[in-house]
Amino acid sequence: MNDKKLSINNLLGIKYLNLADVDLIFETADYFKEVINRSIKKVPVLRDLTIANLFFENSTRTKLSFELAQKRLSSEIINFSSAQSSLKKGESLIDTVNNILAMKVDIIVIRHPDPGAAMFLSKNVNSCIINAGDGTHEHPTQALLDAYSLKEKLGNLEGKKIVIVGDILHSRVALSNIFLLKMLGADVKLCGPKTLMPYYAESLGVSLEMDLSKAIKWCDAANMLRVQNERMDQSYFPSIHEYTSLYGLGLPLLKTLNKEIVVLHPGPINRGVEITSELADSKQAIILDQVQNGVAIRMAVIYLLASKLIIP
Amino acid sequence: MSTRKILNNTKIDIILNRLVCQLIEKHLDFKNTILIGLQPRGVFLLDRLILILEKKYKILNLNYGKLDTTFFRDDFRRSNKPLKANSSIINVSIEGKSIVFIDDVLYTGRSIRAALTAIETYGRPVNIELLVLIDRRFSRHLPIQPDYVGMKVDALQNDIVKVNWKQNDNEDSIYLLKKINE
């Protein structure tokens, strides 16, 4: 028990983790979840570390969640947003990050619109890198918090049936979720319009279902993804109205089931598009549990990676 | 490594009973007292003390909990050995209560320093005492002293004091392990 450490030095994606890593992250998150429910929600463990949050893409939840996790671990934080940066003056990503590291920063959290940005950085700068979302590639901490939240509701995910619904093509959340849920032994199905399904979907070891009601009847939990209009360079479906009528989830469909399924959403929610307001606010939706667990999971990831930065 | 048994089952039983009597003398019915076992090994001692308090002295409705200090320690990133966390379970408010920290061995005092910081995150107790089974006196790094002591042991820095509990290690015993040929 006492020799447990992560097998990785950077969190670049779920595909670089093994099952022991995931178990350790979940177990550590349990302890942090207890910490953030105390009257003083802060521990001093990272007081001698500085973390830079580099967000080259808009974010509300993930940025706040990382920042809160870092504050609750007592680390120093600097925040960087590409909108007000020298990137506009033509500085390269490596130069920007190396300049930040020269200010004695220990850990970099990066969100970037380009797939592979976190991996690129990890190969070119000498720091611990945490991927907070790289384009349409991976969003490992979101998948970890989704699976952690699901485990709280469903127990062991081995053999559990999970459907991911919506814009799979543009979703880093979907890809990371598929990798992690498969690793945990879940049966994963993707559901959405064919145009929003990646051509390699079946090679990921998942099944496809175009009919939402069939997919919902089959599953124990449904992860409803947002339609990512900002990443769409062409029209993938005729209209939002048509998308909603075919792939929007609401209470009426759930009431036809003889079981209660768990509904997740990584946010931000487009109420009335992929999920109705009524369902989003119902007990079946664990959206706010996901948000709370996100802080504990990120505390665990940062703590476990930081423990590998040994003071010489 | 040479091994010497410094306490056997009978002597440990006598000491536990004495510690319980000392606690009762100070805390009477324990109405405003919370016994806190420090993770990981102080919890075994806590369990034994509770057993005697409840069975022998019929003091029921005790308030107690477990406190983990991993995230409050000062040796994070100081060795290759990872700091393994344990659960903290304190289900009662500590505000205005008397706390008794319970641990098996008091050595450098750094774990107790961490516990003093950790308990603050639950509120402001009126006072905090320390009960230990073994006090490795002359080994302190910090100005921390116990209020209740089972036994004082003189041990060198490289020595190990190993406490075994029958509920976990099949026997109640305490060994002093000394490195030889140094």
Image: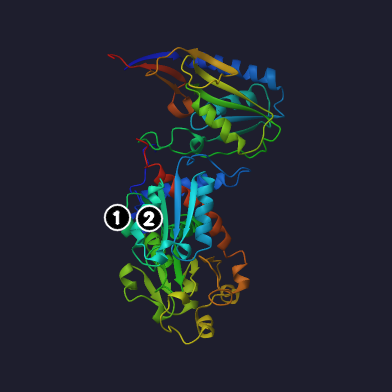
Q: Which residue is mark 1?
A: A124
Residue at disc 1, secondary structure: helix
Residue at image position (41%, 47%) is A103
Type of amino acid at the residue the image marks with label 1: Asn
B75 to B134, vertically: above or below: below
Q: Chain of mark 2?
A: A
Quadrant of the rendering where the N terminus of chain B is positioned: top left
> Tag on residue B144?
none
Q: Chain of mark 1?
A: A
Type of amino acid at the residue the image marks with label 2: Val
Q: Image check: B67 left or right of B85?
A: right
Q: Are marks 1 and 2 on the same chain?
A: yes
- Residue B118, position as x, y percentages in the image: 56, 35
Instruction: Identify the residue at the far front of this view.
Output: A89
- Residue A174, position as x, y percentages in the image: 42, 67
Contact between marks 1 and 2 (CB within 8 A): the answer is no
- Which of the two residues, B124 or A182, is positioned nearer the viewer here? B124
Residue at image position (37%, 34%) is B79
Quadrant of the rendering where the C terminus of chain B is positioned: top left
- Residue A157, position as x, y percentages in the image: 44, 58
Residue at image position (41%, 58%) is A110
Instruction: Identify the residue at the far left of this view.
Output: B181
Tell which circle, 1 or 2, labels the residue nearer the N-terminal end. 2
Q: Nearer the viewer, mark 1 or mark 2?
A: 2
B54 to A2, vertically: above or below: above
Whether residue A231 is visible: yes
Q: Which residue is mark 2?
A: A97
Instruction: Give the CA separation, mark 1 to mark 2.
Output: 10 Å
Q: Residue A111 appears in which quarter of the rendering? A: bottom left
Whether residue A134 is visible: no
B80 to A295, vertically: above or below: above
Bin the neighbour count of mark 1 within 10 Å (Cα to Cα): few under 14, some 14-19, many 20 and up. few
